[in-house]
Image: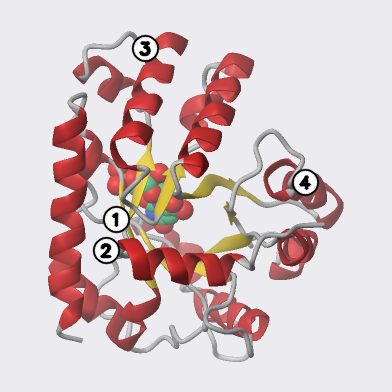
């Protein structure tokens, strides 16, 4: 169905060429106002276009947060479609942050929405929630394999409430988050240079040495900036797995807008701080 190389291969290449930083496109109403824009579709369009034009040619991944576009209904979705197209055209991989998760047959429709090459919202990867059971994601796994796209599965999220579910201990003594990591390691087994099935692992979580983060797939690390984690925290959180980490920042960069040069500089500063922090590992 697709001439695309597998997502893991494309991501490794992009990270090698551009560094691993993922910048978020999160058009919060408050940011629109701070940027001197109206909280309407025109403001949304301007915000999103500015971020894409400022950084899509230099970061490995752009991650639009779908909720902030869905808020405006069909016209917001149209802006999202355009943003995805512009970002991909500028050479960034697009990770659609829609955190979908449903029973298998409905999951299949979500997968078609974001991972089928003929969909208007076709993206390089999608965030998904495994909390209807990891197996419920299998239609998305299958379509991702077919279309050369990837998934990022919520394993150990950056928010403090996540532990209630993710740290729950199962009958076999393993906790739920660790179980998700194990599923992903199995999905990525034997893939080179990197599997296409990633985990979301918050940069805010402190020492994770009790977890096996060696899933042979990417680890999306949100929580840097507005949620309090810093680039200097990353080696302690990720250890040797830092090589496969995709550090993510939204508001920490976006608050520097609307000036495109200031957005670029903020992204470059994060990229450099991350490079220095992980070089020692
Ligand atoms: O999947 C995500 O992207 C995600 C997972 C997670 O555990 N924590 C988390 O903050 N995110 C997303 O990452 C972004 C973080 O934004 P900032 O806190 O502004 O950098 C938001 O779009 C969140 O929805």
User: Whole-percent x and y of residue 46?
Assistant: 37, 18
Residues at marks 3 and 1, CA–CA distance in whole angstroms: 25 Å
Residues at marks 1 and 4, CA–CA distance in whole angstroms: 29 Å
Residue bearing the label numbered 3: 39
Asked if ligand 1 lies within 8 A of label 1, the reply is yes
Disc 4 element: helix
CB-based contact (under 8 Å), mark 2 and mark 1: yes
Q: Residue at x 76, y 62 (%)?
A: 136
Of callouts 2 and 1, which one flags the residue occurring earlier in the amino acid sequence? 2
The answer to whether residue 155 is seen in the rendering is no
Disc 3 element: loop
User: Whole-percent x and y of residue 170?
Assistant: 59, 82
Asked if ligand 1 lies within 8 A of label 3, the reply is no
User: Whole-percent x and y of residue 217?
Assistant: 52, 76
Q: Label for residue 204?
A: 2
Residues at marks 3 and 4, CA–CA distance in whole angstroms: 30 Å
Residue bearing the label numbered 1: 223
Hey, which quadrant is residue 201 in on the image?
A: bottom left
CB-based contact (under 8 Å), mark 3 and mark 1: no
């Amino acid at each position: 169905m697709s001439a695309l190389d597998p997502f893991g291969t494309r991501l490794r290449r992009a990270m090698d060429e551009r560094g691993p930083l993922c910048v978020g496109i999160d058009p919060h109403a408050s940011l629109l106002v701070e940027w001197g824009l109206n909280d309407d579709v025109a403001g949304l369009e301007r915000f999103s276009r500015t971020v894409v034009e400022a950084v899509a040619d230099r970061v490995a991944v752009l991650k639009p947060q779908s909720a902030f576009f869905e808020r405006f209904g069909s016209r917001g979705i149209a802006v999202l479609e355009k943003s995805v197209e512009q970002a991909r055209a500028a050479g960034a991989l697009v990770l659609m942050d829609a955190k979908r998760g449903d029973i298998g047959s409905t999951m299949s429709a979500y997968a078609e929405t974001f991972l089928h090459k003929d969909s208007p919202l076709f993206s390089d990867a999608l965030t998904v929630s495994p909390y209807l059971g990891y197996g419920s994601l299998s239609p998305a796994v299958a379509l991702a394999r077919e279309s050369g796209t990837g998934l990022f599965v919520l394993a150990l999220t950056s928010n403090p409430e996540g532990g209630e579910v993710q740290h729950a201990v199962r009958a076999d003594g393993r906790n739920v988050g660790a179980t998700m990591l194990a599923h992903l390691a199995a999905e990525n087994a034997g893939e080179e240079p990197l599997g296409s099935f990633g985990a979301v692992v918050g940069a805010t979580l402190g020492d994770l040495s009790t977890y096996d983060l060696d899933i042979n797939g990417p680890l999306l690390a949100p929580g840097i900036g507005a949620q309090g984690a810093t680039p200097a925290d990353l080696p302690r959180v990720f250890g040797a797995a830092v090589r496969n980490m995709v550090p993510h920042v939204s508001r920490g960069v976006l608050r520097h807008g609307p000036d495109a040069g200031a957005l670029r500089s903020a992204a470059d500063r994060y990229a450099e701080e991350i490079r220095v922090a992980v070089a020692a590992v």
